[in-house]
């Protein structure tokens, strides 16, 4: 696949994508392709394109979004790319060029061009814009009728046929085709073809490569009838073509196809306003092509949004209430998905031996895949607690389960079993499986975290055997656990992360479970200078219940 720049504040050569590759675009110098951002509209990491059973584009939660064929993409969800698609981010516009693509029209035909670039370059003439007011009145009437038919078309092929019919009826040209470029240079798909000669077949028609190449720059071009016969390329001369016109059909400032017309031999003289008429028809066809693409993408986006809403509703059923008391433990929690559904998980479970287990995890990746893994992990943990209260056994079996099914995903997790003692404090047996994001409130001092060994993240190596560790909390102390959406959040114009030190300092002034989670969220939102965080964010405060 290639990305061809159609517009931008600086010049980029065509960007080549090889099979299996992933490329990140944004304003940060750490991106594979840093993009200049004169309008301050591009995020540090704005979007990426990856080969995953076909080429897909994913908006990376950018502030101003990524447009594909005029439709804003849902963030963090991969959308398939097709040949001719147009990508817009800020002041940049790219056209997608891929080889393996679905044919747009059921009867489309691949055609080759005449390699006449050396012989007939002197014949190619760029056509300046001409006012529509100069069109003959009957051609204006045809144009209005054509506009109505094109606008009412259900697909591109139908719209193209309406455009070609109007061109043949009103310009004097005898043949007309609508072509879209393929991956190989000099090859095109014929989406529609019409001719006054009933014996014409598009497979026997040749097209001027020099005309098409010049039109690819976005201008209407024609083979000048003022050139002498000797100036014509050999192939053009043999075909006895005396006039030809090529109109680029533009979508978001990039040509997605071409209206191509020619007249030969004794065929009728081309009208003087054919270029102006063709330019107008090309604009109509471009608007309709853009609308058709946008509608198709909007349907996909709406279907995806429906699925995401359903997944978010199902996910909420797996979570405990935001505040509660379970056995001897009280807690508060909040979860803010980064993009509709979260890959974070949280639970509080009373065990058969009377102790209480609390756990918080973070699934790698984003979106629906992470949400499914979250649900799988949370359900498995609950099922295991029906069999055992040993968290080392639970984590060992969970790891083996995830590693055999995860397709490369993994889970970081903190899990702890709380046993209240006679002093009002508690002993906590815990396992930190590559998580690391937790602190213990400490009265009038910054929240701290004790030294610990830790373990490997869940889902990497099915042979891992987990071992638990222990620490103690005094009366009134609370364990505050959170996902990496807290510590890895950055402000708009910096790569500096919020970090553990800010979280610890902020928790110094909190007085209760609910205070812990709300203050920490407010602190991160203020740091981000946005109400939309870059990643899933879950915070939980857990401690010994002191009420009746």
Image (spheres, rainbow, N blue to C red):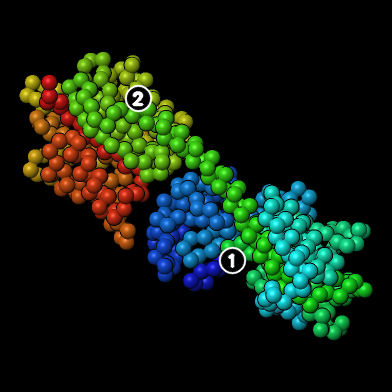
Q: Where is residue 17 in the image (x, y as percent from the top left)?
A: 56, 57
Residue 95 lies left or right of residue 65; in this view the side is right
Q: State the quadrant of the C terminus.
A: top left
- According to the picture, the residue beneath numbered tag 2 turns out to be 381
Residue 44 lies left or right of residue 205; in this view the side is left
Question: Closer to the camera, 466 or 127?
Answer: 127
Q: State the quadrant of the N terminus.
A: bottom right
Q: Is residue 453 above or below residue 152?
A: above
User: Which numbered disc covers residue 474?
Assistant: none
Q: Position of residue 434 (x, y in %)?
A: 31, 38
Residue at the (31%, 31%) spot, across then down: 346
Residue 364 in sight: yes
Residue 467 in sight: no
- According to the picture, the residue beneath numbered tag 1 turns out to be 253
Residue 174 lies left or right of residue 390; in this view the side is right
Q: Is residue 314 above or below residue 67?
A: above
Neighbourhood count class around disc 1 (C-alpha, 10 Å): few under 14, some 14–19, many 20 upward: some
Neighbourhood count class around disc 2 (C-alpha, 10 Å): few under 14, some 14–19, many 20 upward: some
Q: Distance between the residues labelled 2 and 1?
A: 53 Å
The kind of secondary structure element at disc 2 is helix
Residue at the (30%, 60%) spot, across then down: 494
Q: Where is residue 24 in the image (x, y as percent from the top left)?
A: 46, 56
Question: Would you identify the image quadrant in which residue 141 lies?
Answer: bottom right
């Amino acid at each position: 696949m290639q990305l061809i720049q159609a517009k931008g504040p600086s010049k980029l050569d065509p960007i080549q994508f090889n099979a299996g590759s992933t490329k990140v675009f944004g304003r940060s110098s750490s991106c594979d392709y840093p993009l200049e951002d004169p309008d301050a509209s591009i995020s540090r990491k704005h979007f990426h394109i990856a080969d995953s059973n076909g080429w897909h584009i994913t908006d990376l939660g950018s502030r101003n979004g990524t447009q594909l064929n005029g439709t804003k993409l849902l963030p963090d969800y991969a959308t398939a790319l097709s040949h001719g698609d147009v990508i817009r981010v800020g002041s940049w516009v790219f056209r997608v060029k891929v080889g393996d693509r679905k044919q747009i029209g059921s009867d489309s035909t691949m055609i080759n061009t005449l390699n006449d670039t050396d012989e007939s370059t002197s014949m190619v003439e760029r056509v300046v814009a001409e006012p529509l007011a100069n069109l003959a009145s009957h051609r204006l009437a045809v144009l209005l009728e054509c506009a109505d038919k094109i606008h009412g078309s259900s697909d591109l092929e139908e719209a193209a046929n309406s455009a070609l019919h109007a061109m043949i009826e009103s310009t004097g040209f005898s043949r007309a085709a609508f072509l879209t470029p393929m991956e190989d240079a000099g090859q095109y798909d014929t989406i529609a073809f019409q001719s006054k000669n009933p014996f014409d077949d598009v497979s026997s028609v040749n097209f001027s490569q020099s005309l098409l190449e010049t039109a690819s720059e976005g201008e209407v071009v024609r083979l000048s009838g003022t050139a002498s016969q000797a100036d014509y390329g050999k192939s053009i001369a043999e075909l006895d073509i005396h006039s030809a016109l090529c109109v680029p059909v533009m979508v978001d400032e990039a040509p997605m196809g071409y209206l191509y017309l020619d007249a030969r031999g004794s065929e009728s003289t081309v009208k003087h306003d054919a270029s102006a008429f063709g330019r107008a028809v090309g604009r109509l066809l471009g608007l309709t092509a853009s609308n058709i693409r946008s509608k198709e993408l909007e349907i996909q986006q709406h279907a995806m949004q429906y699925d995401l809403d359903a997944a978010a509703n199902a996910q909420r059923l797996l979570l405990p209430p935001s505040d509660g008391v379970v056995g001897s433990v009280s807690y508060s929690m909040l979860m803010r998905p980064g993009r509709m559904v979260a890959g974070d998980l949280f639970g509080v479970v009373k065990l058969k031996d009377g102790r209480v287990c609390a756990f918080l995890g973070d699934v790698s990746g984003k979106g629906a895949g992470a949400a499914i893994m979250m649900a799988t992990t949370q359900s498995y943990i609950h099922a295991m607690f029906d069999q055992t209260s040993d968290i080392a056994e639970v984590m060992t079996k969970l790891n083996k389960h995830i590693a055999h099914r995860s397709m490369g995903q993994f889970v970081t997790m903190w899990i702890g079993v709380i046993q209240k003692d006679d002093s009002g404090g508690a002993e906590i047996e815990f396992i930190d499986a590559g998580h690391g994001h937790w602190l213990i409130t400490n009265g009038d001092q910054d929240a701290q975290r004790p030294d610990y060994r830790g373990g490997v993240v869940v889902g990497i190596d099915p042979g891992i055997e987990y071992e638990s560790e222990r620490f103690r909390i005094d009366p009134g102390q609370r364990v505050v656990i959170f996902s990496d959406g807290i510590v890895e959040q950055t402000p708009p114009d910096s790569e500096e992360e919020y970090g553990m030190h800010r979280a610890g300092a902020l928790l110094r002034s909190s007085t209760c479970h609910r205070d812990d989670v709300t203050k920490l969220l407010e602190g991160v939102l203020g740091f981000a200078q946005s109400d939309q965080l870059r990643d899933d964010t879950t915070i939980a405060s857990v401690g010994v219940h002191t009420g009746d």
